[in-house]
Image (cartoon, grey):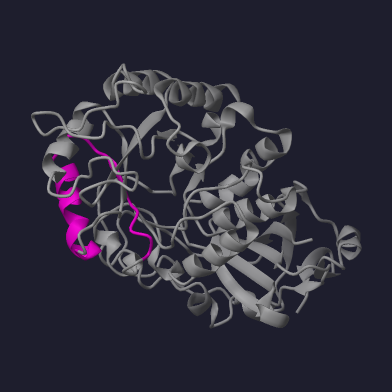
Amino acid sequence: MSKIITFSVILCLSALAIAVAGRVVGPLLRFQDKPSFLRPTFSRIFDTSMYGTLQLNNGLAQTPQMGWNSWNFFACDINETVIKETADALISTGLADLGYVYVNIDDCWSSPIRNSEGQLVPDPKTFPSGIKALADYIHGKGLKLGIYSDAGVFTCQVRPGSLYHESDDAKLFASWDVDYLKYDNCYNLGIPPKERYPPMREALNTSGRTIFYSLCEWGVDDPALWAGKVGNSWRTTDDINDSWASMTTIADLNDKWASYAGPGGWNDPDMLEVGNGGMSYQEYRAHFSIWALMKAPLLIGCDVRNMTAETFEILSNEEVIAVNQDSLGVQGRKVNVSGTDGVYQVWAGPLSGHRLAVALWNRGSTTKTITAKWEALGLQSSISVSVRDLWQLRIMPCHHLVLWLMLMTVTCTSSLPRLSH
């Protein structure tokens, strides 16, 4: 069984002078006097040198977006009742209070053709009240409404796309009080993404409403290299599906672009599959942990009206969510691999408050001790730390760490526990 242990390492020596102020261009990690407990390799391991070089500056996405999207569970089987009930469930379960505020309608909301004036029209059978009325309902709950379109002549489900209609569609979305646009990549006429996605940015910026712009070009043209000046997040991969193989593959692909993400613009490895039934509890917990550490958007993809207790436990873990929403905004990444095919992995990322989030990820089929070495984390071996397990929700005392030795190699010296080195 594949397992993950996720915990926060709280540094206890001198102050780590890390700050993000306004629109930063270049590294997020800046030091006046580099603390003695950091190795010279720390800034290289957690490189953010490409962050902000071409950032869209619309004031949104200071932390990764959180909410719900209809596609992974409902696909085209959506209607305004489902959307309203989902909003109600986000409120009644307390998920909205944890940050899940975007209620995003994916494909299939519109009629198959535009009206006589060339405007998009909600499907009268499934959205008879219209999108504006739905937005009013969502906003009345204190939530935000997202909608879907495509940078092609059709959406992926062959509804009208927004290519060559960017200005009209952006104004229409704004008139409906939409807060978020997911912009897909189907039926694109072979036009490069770098040409098709900026026009919608310009249209949104002149629409009269501030709208979160989520690019979904599937990582085809390496959007991390250019999309920061276009949108608030950009898909780095093909669509996820509800399987261990898909999830792990996508995590690896997204990891490549860690140095480009930060407040205002995030790498997007696609929506969460937690709760849809294709993976085990342990695998879903790994999925949620790694997405949180990677500063990926946390967009729930299951039916929140009918969640199991295990699904809710994963999605509502406030300490794991806090890793994702940490103000420093540095994407965690894979820092060490070992074993056949690299199945024993250490992922880590700096947090505010002199902390480091670390995940020990066993992607193999047998129990294995995984060692997080100081060198891999960019820390001096003389450092003293406190270790908190974010799933057990407790500080791990010295004697308890020994009991976990077969899951993660942890030793302790003096009065504070230390990771092994």
Answer whether residue 398 is visible to the viewer in this image. yes
Using the image, determine if residue 230 lies above or below residue 129: below
Answer whether residue 413 is visible to the viewer in this image. no
Residue farthest to the left?
A: 117
Using the image, determine if residue 262 lies above or below residue 221: above
Percent coordinates x, y for residue 82 in the rendering:
47, 24
Quadrant of the drawing holding the N terminus = bottom right
Q: Residue at x 34, y 21 (%)?
A: 125
| Magenta-colored span | 191-219
Q: Is residue 143 left or right of residue 246?
A: left
Percent coordinates x, y for residue 344 in the rendering:
71, 73
Write down the quadrant of residue 128 in the picture. Answer: top left
Q: Is residue 43 magenta?
A: no
Q: Is residue 179 left or right of residue 205?
A: right
Q: Is residue 208 magenta?
A: yes
Q: Is residue 201 left or right of residue 309?
A: left
Quadrant of the drawing holding the C terminus = bottom right
Depth check, front residue: 279 or 309: 279
Depth check, front residue: 380 or 57: 57
Using the image, determine if residue 232 lies above or below residue 25: above
Percent coordinates x, y for residue 359 in the rendering:
67, 63
All told, the count of numbered labels is 0
Percent coordinates x, y for residue 180 in the rendering:
32, 39
Write down the quadrant of residue 263 in the picture. Answer: bottom left
